[in-house]
Image (cartoon, grey):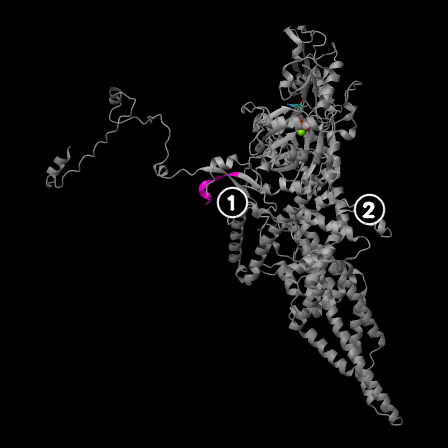
Amino acid sequence: MAAADVRDMLDLPAEGQPRPHKKQKVVEKRPEGITRELYALLGERAPPIAINENRYKGRPKWMSKLRVRPWRMAPFTNEARSDGLVLHHWQRQGDTVKPALEGPETEGEEQKQDEGAPQTPDQEYLFAKYNVKARVPRRYTDEEYNRHLKSDDWSRQETDYLMDLVEEYDLRWVVIADRYDFQPHPVDAETNNSALVPANQVRTMEHMKARYYFVAASMLALEHPPSEMSEAEFDLHEKMMKFEPERERARKELAALQLERTADAVREEGVLLEELKRITANEQNFIAERRELYSRLEVPISVGNTTMYQSSQGLSQLLQTLLQADKSKKRRSILGPEGAAPSPAAQTPAPNANTRDSRGETPSNAQAAPTNKKAAAAAAANKEAQQSIRTLTPSEEARYGVQHHDRLAPGVQFRSDRAQKLTQAKSNVQTQKLAAALAELEVPLRLVMPTERVCKEFEKLIHSVNLLLDARKVAEKVESEIRVLEAAKQERERKAKEAKEKEKPEVKTEQDDNPAPTADVATESTSAAAAALPSAEGQETAGGTEDKEAEAGSGDTGEATAREGTSQKRSASVLSNTSDKSTKRQKKYLLGINCLCHLLVSACTRNQDDDPQTSIRR
Amino acid sequence: MNPSIPPSTAEYGGDEVSAIVLDPGFSTTRAGFAGEDTPKSLIPTYYGKYTSEGQDRLIFSDDVFVTPRPSLSVHNPMGRDGIVEDWDMAEKVWEYSFTSRLTGPRPGNPFQNGLNDIADGELPTEMEGVETEEKPLADSPLLMSECGWNPTKAREKTIEIAMEKWGTPAFYLAKNGVLAAFASGKASALVVDVGASNISVTPVHDGMVLKRGVQHSPLGGDYISSQIRALFKANTPQPITITPHYLISSKTAVDAGQPSQAKYKTFPPGKAPDASYRTLLEERTLSEFKECVVQVWPGPNKLSATGPSGVSNEEVAKSNPGRPFEFPDGYNQVFGLDRYRVVESLFDAKAAIPDTESPFPAPTQAQTVPELIKNALNGVDVDIRPHLLANVVVTGASSLLHGFTDRLNQELMQTYPGPRVRISAPGNTAERKFGSWIGGSILASLGTFHQMWISKKEYEEHGPTIVEKRCK
Ligand SMILES: Nc1ncnc2c1ncn2[C@@H]1O[C@H](COP(=O)(O)OP(=O)(O)OP(=O)(O)O)[C@@H](O)[C@H]1O
Ligand SMILES: [Mg+2]
């Protein structure tokens, strides 16, 4: 269908606009060398082959307008030379505005170096600027030499020779040491044959450097006293003054040894390096994983609120999300056996269930026994329940980190939380003291790796620290009391002297008041003495006893401290004849505690250090 | 200007002043224009001498080889240690090397060249002051090379010749070790040059030779030739004699190992050339033999050692296919293990083939290449040794021996297992043969070098001793 028909049908005005003209046919010019007939055969469209005109590629048109700039052999001088040597090189004539030398005349002339026009003075030789010299210090005068630079080891001539060489070889020490060949002038040797310089002394590079640096530094200091030097100068001065030829020599010896290692040594070194690389890579891995672990552990703490997980619904939700995360991450557990627990709920740590349970109770052994029994019974029951499924031997239990609890607090708990809680005493002052004590022992407040063992040790440590703090408090009090009482005693003696005849009943009443507090102190000191014993039970009981007091911070009863506080206040005011014995004991006890603490701390830190590695090995 | 910043590419490099570079060696003398990549003129340092019509005549260049003139004797102005012995002849040979191909012959005395007809006794007086002869190098600065142990006397003699006899406007004398290092683009390197008369090891630091480290030993190409001669003498089916081409009028092909069937030329008594001529031509055959048969045991370990699998290295070498060689008289033989043995003594002195008639005494272990390198390194500061080991430059035509660099690499890695050992040896034959010439060509065409020349003026002021001061 033609366009006209369509127009027709659509009732459009026929040929509204004139049709666009057909493009003018480009008539390609017939290249030379092809006959007309042959060219006609090619048809309208020439095949995509280049028809070469066999001619040289001419210059571009714009170029033909330019004039050819001739090159000519031109003489030049080099500013880096002092003798004005004239050499010749090819140069574009346009480049220099030089009067053209007329050919035949110059060529006919003999080219002596004095002749020949050097280039115009304003045009410097292109390469002259690369003529750079190293900066060497100003040469000393005779007076300066005699005053500052004299040396037993170096004669003036040799020093001059050295400075010349240094300048000549631009401080390239390797070359200087290679070319160093000082021959004392024979005349000089005769005139002052009393000179100390032996004729054939072998100078090492270190000798030369030491001498040169000394001279250079001295000259620098002469020019500007050190107080006026710029920073760079001062640095240079310092560096030069501090040059130690001995050390340099030792270093070179080592370098020579290193160069001449045997193949075995090299191989061994390679193996060691490989090992080191492996270890550092592992460490990097470990650090990355630990960081990840931290970020996980930190999340619940920053939220701070675990109540939402305390309902079963919340728990299952948590489990779900954790499983999801696990699946998506497929992370290799690095927690070791404990980390292998299926869900965080099972991780509920119960280190020292015993000590914790006994907290609320009286610290006597007799009373602790039944609870233990109770716990044992519960454990047995647990075991029985498990036996139906699968019995785990104790070693297996230890390996899988299975624990039995007689009483479980509802909800999720973190082991680290518990350890954290221990560091919070009831009073702010106490907390700070605790923190200070820990800082002194270089144990972080926040456990780095709260494994069960570490937590246990940490708990022990905290107990001991509490014990220590209390003991310190008591000791301070006792000491001050002693001081007060001593003062009182003196006063009394004075008074007694004054009124020897009169006897007052005051003393008696004081003595009457005594019994209760002394008893108090006595019990304390006995238990303390027990604690000082290095036996495990002693520690346990001591821990138990002190727990009661430590509970003040975390536990629900503040009475213990309150009671103690009052008793101590009372004793401070009333206590009259605290026996020296008991104070001595107190001191001993303090010492014991101190030792204990150190032991515990070391154990604790060791555990912390150990654990990462054990977990890696696993 | 901060010297640690390299100049931009536009500023880098060349400024040619049409200097001539002359690299005289024991076997060949190389000359050419600076800035070119190979020497235009390559002539043997040997020259021929004969008497004809009662006059002594000299033959230079390859013409020496061509005609066996009666009583033609061949000499070398250089001594075996690489230092010039015959200065007059050295001057002539060197002059021939550049006048023959580069500068053209010096124009003769205008009164004697036949272009000017001057009646006897009619010498114009004003012509008397004119120098009758233009000196051959009047327009061209000259850069010459020398070996690292060239004594001061010889250096001064060299500048004297260049300045006074050749009239060069500017002169410089560079160590060929330094030049070879430049040719491989290094300013610091350990250059191992295996030439004809010597093997030399030159530590170069920042473009300067460390003199205390320079080592050389006579185990060069000529020593290898003497080892090959010793091998031929002790050859098993029958001793091999080398008969140069000029003594053979015709030959027929024979099977390997069969005695040759050639017709020999004979010279009437008194018409034969000197024995030194024959030796020189035999040397050409030996060079050919070195090029296509001789092979260095590539290592690891010596040829006499036992490999890791319990098979001795000699067995392994034997199992490699042999290489045939046909002598000018048609005798031919396949060389197996023997082709390794002739060069083994470059690395293991004990492996030298004994020959009582050889002009070379049996080598000592201290003369072997690895020991030379070790001694060279011990002569320089310990701090630059690792750097030198990482920049070992191998040059000299005899280093073209098959497997030489492999073996050298193995030996160095064995002696120095710690530091990185890197050998740079150009694969291009010309670059290896003319290493020091090429370095000179680069140096003399650098714009920054032109301040180093000793000018004629300076020479006239200070005399020949200036060469010691300036060419360090
Ligand atoms: N391809 C090759 N393989 C082995 N040797 C060769 C080869 N080509 C040449 N030679 C030998 O190398 C020697 C020449 O080496 P070169 O030209 O480096 O020495 P030179 O510089 O003249 O002498 P020198 O350095 O001792 O003064 C000769 O002995 C020759 O036989
Ligand atoms: Mg050479």
- Place residue B117 in its image quadrant: top right
Is A433 drawn above or below residue A322 in the view shown? below
Q: Nearer the viewer, residue A614 or B415?
A: B415
Residue B209 appears at what percent x and percent y? 69, 39
Disc 1 versus disc 2: distance between alpha carbons?
48 Å
Q: Mark 1 and ligand 2: say if the CB distance to the nearest ligand atom is below 8 Å.
A: no
Residue ranking furthest to the front: B121
Residue A160 appears at what percent x and percent y? 74, 51
Label annotation for residue A474: none
Q: Is residue A319 magenta?
A: no
The quadrant of the image that shows the C terminus of chain B is top right
Q: Nearer the viewer, residue A358 or B460?
A: B460
**Dot 1, how many residues are within 10 Å of its Cα: few (below 14), some (14-19), or many (20+)?**
some
Tell me the residue that label 1 is attached to: A119
Indicate the chain on which mark 1 is placed. Answer: A
Indicate the chain on which mark 2 is placed. Answer: A
- Place residue A593 in its image quadrant: bottom right
- Place residue B162 in its image quadrant: top right
Whether callout 1 and callout 2 share a subunit is answered yes
Q: Is residue A91 magenta?
A: yes
**Dot 2, how many residues are within 10 Å of its Cα: few (below 14), some (14-19), or many (20+)?**
few
Tell me the residue that label 2 is attached to: A186
Magenta segment: A89-98
Quarter for ligand 1? top right
In the image, taking residue B68 as reference, residue A29 lies left or right, namely left
Is A312 drawn above or below residue B15 in the view shown? below
Instruction: Report if residue A4 is visible in the image.
Output: yes
Q: Nearer the viewer, residue A533 or B289?
A: B289
Residue ranking furthest to the right: A501
